[in-house]
Amino acid sequence: MSDAKQLTALQLVVILISTMIGVGIVLMPRELANEVDSPDLWISIIFGAIAISVISIIYVLLASRYPGKTFFELSPLIMGKSLGFFFNLYYILYSLIVAAYIMRITAGIIKNYLLDTTPLYVIIGTFILVSFYLLSNGAGDVVRFFQLYFPVMLFMFFVLCLLSIKDVDIQNVRPVLKNDFLSTLGGVKITFFSFLGVEFLLIFASLIKKKRVKSLLFTVWTSIGITALIYVIFHIISIGVLGVAELKEITFPTIELAKSIEFQGFFFERFELIFLFGWLTTAFTSFTAYAFSMTLGLKRLIKPSNWMLLISAAGIFTATLLPKGLTEVFHYSAYIQIISLIAIVALPAILLIVSFFRGDSYAS
Amino acid sequence: MVRSPKLNTVDFLQQMQKMPHVTIKEVELSIHLIHILYIPGITDTKRIQGSILQPLMEYDTKGKGSVTHAFSAEPLICLEEIDDAHHHLLDGFTLLIEEETLYAIDSAKFSYRSVQEPVSEMTLRGARDGFIESLDENIALLRVHLRTNDLAFENFTLGKKSFTNVSLAYMKGEANEELLSDVRTRLQQVNATYIPDGGVVEQLLEKNSYSLFPEIQETERPTKVSSALVEGKIAIFVEGSPTVLLAPTTLNALFQKADDYNFKWIPATLIRLMRYFAAVISVMLPAIYISLISFHQGLIPTDLAISISKTREGVPIPSFMEALIMQITIEVLREAGIRLPKPIGPAVSIVGAIVLGEAAVTAGIISPLMVIVVSFAAICSFTIPDYGLSLALRSISFAMLFAAALLGIYGLILAIFALSIHLVRLKSFSVPYLEPFAPYYVNRWKDSIIRMKLKKGSGNNE
């Protein structure tokens, strides 16, 4: 009972969902509306979930073949020292880039909606500082923090949905399946990336005890399923309230949705404050997960020291401040998708195939 | 520990004769001379007369052999070391010297106050007994509520000068063995000269001395101790202190009150929920208020914003300073209220609340809404049952105020994150502080934030 030495299935679900739901929820409606351009764009999310579920089999197989080994321990073991080193380096860079991306979007939204005169580096600096405070003491704290805020996040989504329901115009949601199948499928290339975070099965692997493939797969698929459900409900409500045409134009549709809720006689009248708290929580957990993966990788790569935390924090800070504005960040997102695709599909797949050929299984 | 030299009764007697406060009586028996030593102020002379001298005389007329046979009811301890003899004498024992051997008989009578209701932990219903300054009496009070064989005690002596007796109580079979040995080693590691009170022991046992939150719970109520023991916690009694320490503790335990179990479960749950809500309000409300009016006026409903700006008209100081001044004033009032004698205390709060607050508003220095916000937060903080926790939250409310003044709602949210991270990291005797919320122990949720109905046929768990 003392520390999170081993994760229960529930804890794993919490971690995976907290990592998956992040900045995607504020960006995806617009990107998806531009790509699919029809009210049934939420069907793309289901396809995306199915795609990631298939990919997640790779992680589950790897995790059960080498129980207790993180990605950074796996790659040198399977690929040999030098090739494994490059795998790890790539994965660290990937974590850095995604963390910086999440950070930049978050900071952009904060600047846009809450602190329009505060300099960006102050917003980013304080956020990174708090996040690294959480990281500085290892995985146990991270897991407990995620657990603490998971109900907060769920509650926020629940309330937002409940309050928006009365503004939903059913005409906006119809017709379903008007579109041709191909364009719906085209949306997958956006929705797929909103499920980034499943790969953390391999990062938190040191805390997962040896489980059967079936139960692990069930846990992972449950997490993907719940995330997909939250996304789908959210998108249906977004379309219902704002309409597809409006979704395409607004930079952050979800926040506008929260803003549009008005309750006369309610003290806050405007709901976006509570929404921003809940959403900042999800951004914080996603960011922390990637920053954690980066520090974990660096610990493998160089001698563990306290400087490593400082170096990673400084690295993310610098990377975050590189793009000049949000438009430039959105411009980069296509490259980030390619980088992610290599990191979460190609690398694990290579690892799995090579490990099959070598036939060595750590499990014994 | 270095063993003290062996006792030589003749030397000891000579040494004691030089001590002005030790009374020495010689009792001439038919077989041999017996010396009786005691310190008058801390012994019961009637008891010495009745249960020591009288049996001795009776024994002299008909008994034979050692005097140990004279005492039937009183336990007789045979002492062999000088230090032991000194300690027993100072503990109120009467020493009996029969030739080469020295015996000690309990005859202590220290002055204690009688059992009263604890001032810091009032209840509406339920037991009104509170611990006093006597260790034996406190353990007796505990026994009233917990009459079981499984109750185990271990004794320690802390303080190189004060020799304070400390008793560790736990339930056999309930208390975790790891936890027990942890508490034991921490008690043995205590290296202090003087132990004035239980609060000092608490700080000496704590690991996170930089944390604001209490790692060990303090209580003056025997019922609280007994239910904690049943739950498998460990209680530490300190001689001369009415507070008993309970370890380990969690944030959730600090929010619970004895009264929660004396009412029906639905109102009890509602009250418990309200207490959590009040704690959050007491920490956050002033900070939320100043972040809203100085950073995000757009988030306030229009009508409210207009009325706020009307009340703030003519207030010369920025809202952050306004809040800070009010918060500090309230803290000063609170401290003054505690220190003053009972009849004057309420007078000060009336002067403070009505005269100062009202006058400040009329003078146009403070806006009336700020007075409402800060005083409501202060009232909310009074609902927190544990004083240590309430102190922690009061300090944190200042930090929140600064965070809100620097970065508005964003700063406030980051400050909440930082506070949560601290709590998530904190452990009390290797039990996570936020248990059962992080990590999850779902089966224990029914007695944490909510208080589920008691199962028929099982006792309460406070």
Image (cartoon, rainbow, N blue to C red):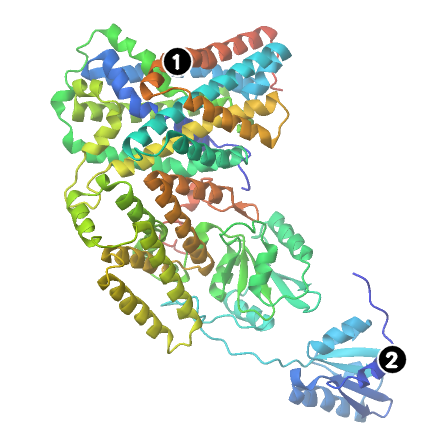
Examine the rendering and report whether any part of residue A72 can be seen: yes
Quarter of the image for residue B10 reads: bottom right
| B12 sits left or right of A113 in the view | right
Residue at the left extreme of this rendering: A171
Q: Secondary structure at mark 1?
A: helix
Percent across and percent down for residue B99 are 87, 82
Do the residues indicated by labels 2 and 1 lie within the same chain of the protein? no
From what the image shows, is residue B420 above or below residue A8? Answer: below
- Picture quarter with the C terminus of chain B: bottom left
Q: In the image, is residue B209 above or below residue A258?
A: below
Give above or below for B417 relative to A222.
below
The chain letter for the residue carrying disc 1 is A
Say which residue appears at 22% left-offset and 23% top-offset.
A236
- In the picture of the structure, the residue carrying the numbered disc 2 is B11
For this view, does B402 lie left or right of residue A181? right
Q: Name which quarter of the figure residue B294 lies in.
A: top left
Mark 2: amino acid: Asp
Instruction: Find numbered disc 2 in the image and state the secondary structure of the residue it sits on.
Output: helix
The three-letter amino acid code for the residue at tag 1 is Gln
Q: Residue at x 41, y 42 (%)?
A: B415
Residue B254: x and y in percent read 45, 55
Relative to B370, is B10 on the left or the right? right
